[in-house]
Image: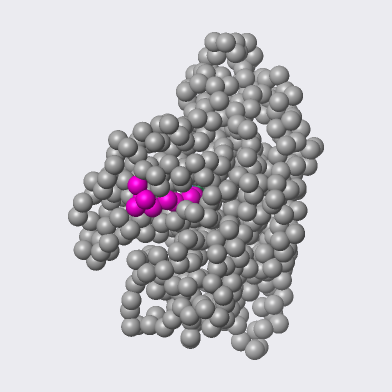
Amino acid sequence: MALITPETRDETATLLAQLVGTGLDFKLGSGVAQQRLAPKDVRDLLVTDLPGEGVDVETLIQELIRSVLPLCNNEASPQFMGFGHTGADVAGLAGGLLALFAQQNLINQSFAAPSATFTEIAVLRWLRELLGLSNPLVSDIGSVWDVGGVATYGGTGSNTVAMLLARENIAPGTLHEGVRDGERMHIVVPAGIGHYSVKSALEWIGCGGRIIEVPTRQYRYDLTALRRALTANKGRIMSVVAYTGNSRTHTVENLRAVHDITREADPGIWLHADACWGLMCALTEQLAHKIDGIADFDSITVDPHKVMDIPYAMSALLVRDPAALRMVSSYSDLIMTEDYAFGQVTPFIGTKEWSSLKLWAMMRAHGRTGLAEMMDRRLGITQAFAGLVDAHPQLLRLNEPDMTAVVFLYLPRGTDPQRPDIARVNAINTAIHRELLDEGLWHFHTFSLPDDYGRLERGATLHPLRFMGNNQRITETHMRDALDYVTAIGRRLDAR
Ligand SMILES: *Cc1c(COP(=O)(O)O)cnc(C)c1O
């Protein structure tokens, strides 16, 4: 059964159906991982030589189920509360499976992706419309330059394309001639809460890691400081980046104000909104006001694999002016000299998977109403969790959730709120996180974070825990159990 043939068709179907069952049971499993081993033990278990003799696919699958799958993290578990990349939407999974079989290549339309190209165009337009960007009439879409977006493999890829656009915008022709005046290619980001991808993008595209970090207030730009930075660096800035949901607290930037201040300082600056998480705000009326102004940004990154329950990997970069993508186009007579070939407008990507079908299927299945209900349920889960944290005398909440992230600290016994021992607080929260990882039963995320509300000590760098309310299987019982678990670890560490 090495290849699909008419003779092996039924046998293959049975085998794959069994595998689907295994996959579903995996996703429905409780706990974060069935088995935990130290990284070096996993290494020694799995990094083996290629055997001389093969095995049949059934044996191979059994081997995977026995040795690899139990060690996998299950982000669909309601006990995995750190992210919520569940990949558990049934329509999304169906779209992903179909794309896997259909094997379309979106680099080219005519012979490699005759219909896939157009479902991709459709879903990019859906995203644009939700975010308030205007779309041309369908009859006016004559080429990929009329679409106003590209699908990529992640927020990192989308942000990199955005930085490439910013670079060509400030110094046209750099694509062909290389970077000449890097001093003009600084970007402005908020200090302490940014995502590494933007800085990495600058480095990858030859601009050097030229970031200007502006102080924040309550996890948004300090607008006075932003104005000052723009004035002080006049002529040196190619882009201002606004996090529409930063990757720590998911606080949504004050987009309208950032837009107005930037355009006033220098209308030539490329405004980029990183809405990897913020896409959520476009899906429900409850949050729509938070992204007011986003449609005036030059480019927007969205990361549906983070917020739409679809399997990895699917992101998109959307541009206000569709023609802007001409600045970073590639031409080759090999396979893409035709109007609808996405290969021309997708830097860094050649062969291009039909990743957008997952999103197309998910959005088609839920419709606008279903999407809004889904997001509203998540907001309810998040509020409930924030309430539990607030009610607990030994837990301290650090952010005001705009979306579904609740960042909190365990406070060791004897913490004096007037004179907190920051090092001790950080050490105990870091130790709690380590135990969570080692045990694999529950999961909260962790990172460094400035105490921007001054809940303990304004400006101090904290190492908190983060809950995400994106997984709709999380119940109040899960939340209570998780917090009991965390506080029990904390008390045990206190006693040492
Ligand atoms: C996750 C994230 C990214 C990177 O996205 P990937 O899909 O992991 O490449 C970029 N920006 C923000 C704000 C993010 O949260």
220 to 45, vertically: above or below: above
Task: Specify whether residue 123 is in view.
Answer: yes
Residue occupying image coordinates x 40% and y 47%:
263
Q: Position of residue 362 (x, y in %)?
A: 67, 64
Is 271 one of the magenta-colored residues?
A: yes
Above or below 111: residue 244: above
On the image, which quarter does residue 21 sit in? bottom right
Q: Quadrant of the N terminus?
A: bottom right
Which one is nearer the viewer's eye here, 279 or 491?
Answer: 279
Say above or below: 52 vs 467. below
Query: Percent position (x, y) of residue 205?
Result: 31, 55
- Residue at (60% x, 83% y) in the render: 4
Please state the total of marks drawn on the protein image. Answer: 0
Which quarter of the image is occupied by the C terminus? top right
- Percent position (x, y) of residue 149? 49, 65
Can residue 29 be seen in this snapshot? no
* 434 lies above or below 246: above
Q: State which quadrant residue 430 falls in.
A: top right
Magenta residues, dominant SS class? strand
Q: Which residues are magenta?
A: 266-275
